[in-house]
Amino acid sequence: MIRRMILGAALALAALPALAQPRAPGTDYPNRPVRIVVALAPGGNADINARLVATALSQRLGQQFVVENRPSGGGTVAFETVAQTPPDGYTLLVGALGSHTLNVGLYGDRLRVHPLTGVDHITISSHSAIVLVVNNNFPARTLAEFRQQVAANPGRFDYGSSGNGTTGHIAAALMLHLMGVQAQHVPYRGSAAAFQDLLAGRTAFQADTISFVTEPIRTGQVRGLVIATPERSPMIPDVPTAAEAGLPAFQATTWTPWSTTLGTPMVIRQFLYEQIAEVLKQPDVRDRLIALGNTIPQGMTPDATRAFIASEIEKWVPVVRATGARVD
């Protein structure tokens, strides 16, 4: 009898995780694997966000959340991929400032899937500051010296980014525009590829997320000249703010939006928002994102996320047009 009681209790405990796995109210969602299409290359901030959250969601919900990178076209390919899938919550989109905002200014009427009318939104998992770094051979240790060098050699210096129209591209173009100087943009397939040429001296500088450049700055692989935020970061405290460096208008922060197919029921999007909000509280996820220099926003519901993206489009599209940045 005691043995049967112990066995029964063990079986009941084993069944608890399955019973406790959350589902969208009134549905059995998710009851199969969920695909996460990332609009940027592996290794960048959006990709890290996606993989951390995907792993935690897989464990929490008992279904696999599988990450797939589609970085082509500055994120436009990822948007088009997701837009063609059923509106059932089984295909998600993770992007950045570039894919969800800057492309509106870069592509104009050629943009096939608009961030406000072509997809629905879920939440934003992080914000990340933009930092300007130069290779160690570049003859400038301050932003003022940087400007002098570039002004004296118009078009001589190249800068890399993770692709045409990406946050790093436009942030650097904005900085050059504000300075009134010129340099040649070289697009790559991802920040990591661009960074390799920066280290090798084939490009002179790169604007990228703090999460990507913190460790190279700390280890002396590159020099950080400016962080495009009102305050210094404790991650790289020696890097001055744009205001301190004499260019206060240079403000640039990217963020990591989660979206899905247009027409996906709100009950599923609200459920996903709530589940992502919960996993972002987990120490293994939260601490990793913060350690990379991210901040985690609160209360980014589906409606709040859409409103935020709309405000960012209103802010950045005129900037994109003023810089003259374009994609071929």
Image (tube, grey):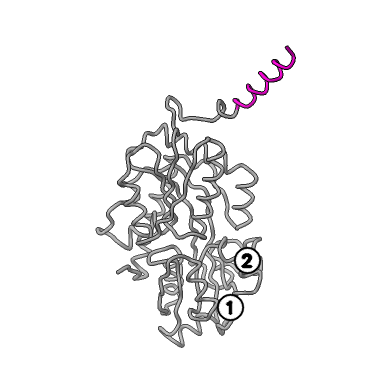
Circle 2 Cα neighbour tier, 10 Å, few/some/many (<14 / 14–19 / ≥20): some
Is the C-beta separation of discs 1 and 2 under 8 Å?
no
Q: How far apart are the alpha carbons under marks 1 and 2?
A: 20 Å
Nearest the eye: 23 or 269? 23
Q: Which amino acid type is marked by label 1?
A: Thr
In the displayed structure, would residue 75 be above or below residue 277?
A: below
Residue at the extreme left: 109
Nearest the eye: 231 or 123? 123
Tell me what residue is drawn at x 44 percent, y 41 percent: 34
If you read the primary sequence from the N terminus, does the residue marked by circle 1 or circle 2 appear first?
1
Circle 1 Cα neighbour tier, 10 Å, few/some/many (<14 / 14–19 / ≥20): some
Check the picture and name the quadrant holding the C terminus.
bottom left
Residue 253 location (% of width, % of height): 50, 59
Tell me if I can see residue 10 in this picture: yes
Tell me what residue is drawn at x 35 percent, y 69 percent: 325
- Residue 142: image tag: 1
Tell me if I can see residue 307 in this picture: no
Q: Which amino acid type is marked by label 2?
A: Glu
**Which residues fall within the magenta stretch?**
1-16
Q: Is residue 2 magenta?
A: yes
Q: Is residue 41 magenta?
A: no
Q: Regarding mark 1 in the picture, which secondary structure is present there?
A: loop
Tell me what residue is drawn at x 56 percent, y 42 percent: 56
Q: Regarding mark 2 in the picture, which secondary structure is present there?
A: helix
- Residue 215: image tag: 2
Secondary structure character of the magenta stretch overall: helix
Residue 303 location (% of width, % of height): 42, 40
Tell me what residue is drawn at x 50 percent, y 37 percent: 63
Residue at the extreme bottom: 152
